[in-house]
Image (cartoon, rainbow, N blue to C red):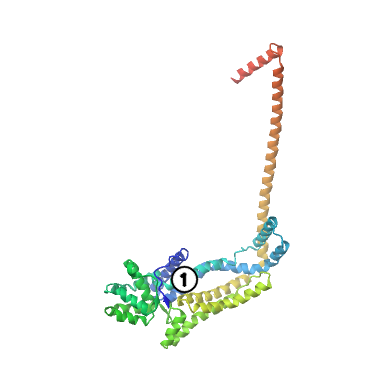
């Protein structure tokens, strides 16, 4: 049973990514058409895959670097873990984190280096599933190829009931009642239904809309041009294509449909084998990782049988491109002196720590000088206050009319005149 997926995806995260990837796919499709005159989504998917992996290559290189250096730095990380084993107080945890961070800086890698690429690839894969399932929503020229037949259908009396009967007879599941929607939404719905129809389903459209044979022929011809890759419909799963091809005795299509998931698993297996594997210091975890690396390609094969063939083409192409990338990456790392890179990172770290040390010493020195200055001012202030208090006391003890009293009066008079 096929699902009808109306228009573009609008989910918060996947929607924008799908629109971006759909826009790139649309431009590639138009570019190939302009240069070669060929309209084929399968070819555009292969080129889109190369573009995406080219953009992700810096992250791939970073991940490979992490895997390579992890084997070198694992003994140091293990020593740190043993040093603080069983210590859960705040000071010990902070010290362990700081020492671990210094080791990563020494080798010039990030602790997240092994998972960033996976976190980025996963939403891209889910978004591509949406794009390949709803191609007319993202590729303008594909959508326009349905305009003639859609306009003819909507001009036919009772077309809504007819379209419902087609959905029912072809067992296409849909959760939206389009009868109350705007005309543009209804048109999109009709496009989605027609795009998901199997080859035999168009015979029913022929029978239900006898006045539209010319438009239907034109649309079916366009679909066979752009939506089939080596005989396989990119919107159908390989399993669906195999069943249809077996019924029609199209054994070449069966072979191509089988080849898509097999190649996707094979290239993924080769890529894993060629990659340097990170060493986590545990034999048990290493065994689990080895088992997972052997199982994942098989899981990829099984999954690819049930998703749109367009996604399988992307998966197989990405595996091939990664194998090619891995060959160049391995040659690049063969020329690199790991010990020399570690020494350079150690020098950088040492300079950073020296700068931090100088800066801290300057702060401590400035704080010390400031404290001394404040203390000195406090001492001077104390002396001045004592003298003032003593002078004031003496003035209070002088008898009125005495010679001392007259001398003070003359002094105060002179001080007042001098301030003026």
Q: Residue at x 63, y 76 (%)?
A: 290
> Where does residue 339 sit, x and y in percent of width and height?
68, 66
- Is residue 267 in view from this perspective? no
From this viewpoint, which residue is outermost toward the right? 83
- Is 119 located above or below residue 203 in the figure? above
* Residue 99: x %, y % from top left: 68, 59
Location of the C terminus by quadrant is top right
Image spot of residue 76 (x, y percent):
70, 64
State which quarter of the image contains the N terminus: bottom left
96 lies left or right of 153: right
Residue 318 in view, yes or no = yes
Above/below status of 334 relative to 364: below
Is 333 or 172 nearer to us in this picture?
Answer: 172
Q: Position of residue 155 (x, y in %)?
A: 27, 72
* Residue shown at 71% from the left, 27% from the top: 386
Question: Badge 1 is on which residue?
Answer: 128
Q: Where, by quadrant of the figure, is residue 328 drawn? A: bottom right
SS label for mark 1: helix
Q: Residue 193 or 98: which is nearer the viewer?
A: 193
Q: Residues within 10 Å of mark 1 (few under 14, many from 20)?
A: many
């Amino acid at each position: 049973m096929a699902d009808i997926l109306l228009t573009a995806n609008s989910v918060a995260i996947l929607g924008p990514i799908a629109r971006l990837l759909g826009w790139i796919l649309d431009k590639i499709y138009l570019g190939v058409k302009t240069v070669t005159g060929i309209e084929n989504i399968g070819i555009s998917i292969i080129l889109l895959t190369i573009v995406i992996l080219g953009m992700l290559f810096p992250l791939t290189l970073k991940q490979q670097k992490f895997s390579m250096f992890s084997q070198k730095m694992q003994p140091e990380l293990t020593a740190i873990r043993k040093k603080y084993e069983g210590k859960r107080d705040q000071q010990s945890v902070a010290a362990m984190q700081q020492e671990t961070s210094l080791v990563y800086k020494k080798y010039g890698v990030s602790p997240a280096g092994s998972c960033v690429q996976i976190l980025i690839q996963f939403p891209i894969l889910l978004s591509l599933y949406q794009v390949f399932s709803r191609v007319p929503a993202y590729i303008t020229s594909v959508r326009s190829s349905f305009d003639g037949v859609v306009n003819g259908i909507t001009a036919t009396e009772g077309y809504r009931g007819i379209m419902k009967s087609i959905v029912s007879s072809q067992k296409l599941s849909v959760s939206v009642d389009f009868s109350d929607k705007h005309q543009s939404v209804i048109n999109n719905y009709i496009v989605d239904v027609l795009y998901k129809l199997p080859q035999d389903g168009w015979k029913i459209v022929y029978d239900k809309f006898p006045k539209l044979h010319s438009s239907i022929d034109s649309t079916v011809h366009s679909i066979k041009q752009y939506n089939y890759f080596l005989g396989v419909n990119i919107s159908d799963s390989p399993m669906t294509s195999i069943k249809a091809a077996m019924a029609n005795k199209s054994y070449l299509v069966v072979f191509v449909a089988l080849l898509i998931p097999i190649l996707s698993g094979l290239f993924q297996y080769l890529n894993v084998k060629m990659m340097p594997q990170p060493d986590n210091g545990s034999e048990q975890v290493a065994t689990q990782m080895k088992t997972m690396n052997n199982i994942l390609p098989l899981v990829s094969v099984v999954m690819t049988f049930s998703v749109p063939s367009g996604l399988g083409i992307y998966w197989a192409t990405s595996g091939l491109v990664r194998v090619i990338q891995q060959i160049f990456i391995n040659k690049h790392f063969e020329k690199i002196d790991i010990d020399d890179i570690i020494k350079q990172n150690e020098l950088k770290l040492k300079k950073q720590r020296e700068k931090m040390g100088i800066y801290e010493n300057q702060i401590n020195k400035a704080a010390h000088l400031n404290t001394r200055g404040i203390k000195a001012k406090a001492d001077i202030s104390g002396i001045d206050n004592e003298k003032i208090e003593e002078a004031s006391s003496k003035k209070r003890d002088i008898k009125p009319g005495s010679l001392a009293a007259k001398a003070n009066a003359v002094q105060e008079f002179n001080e007042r005149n001098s301030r003026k």
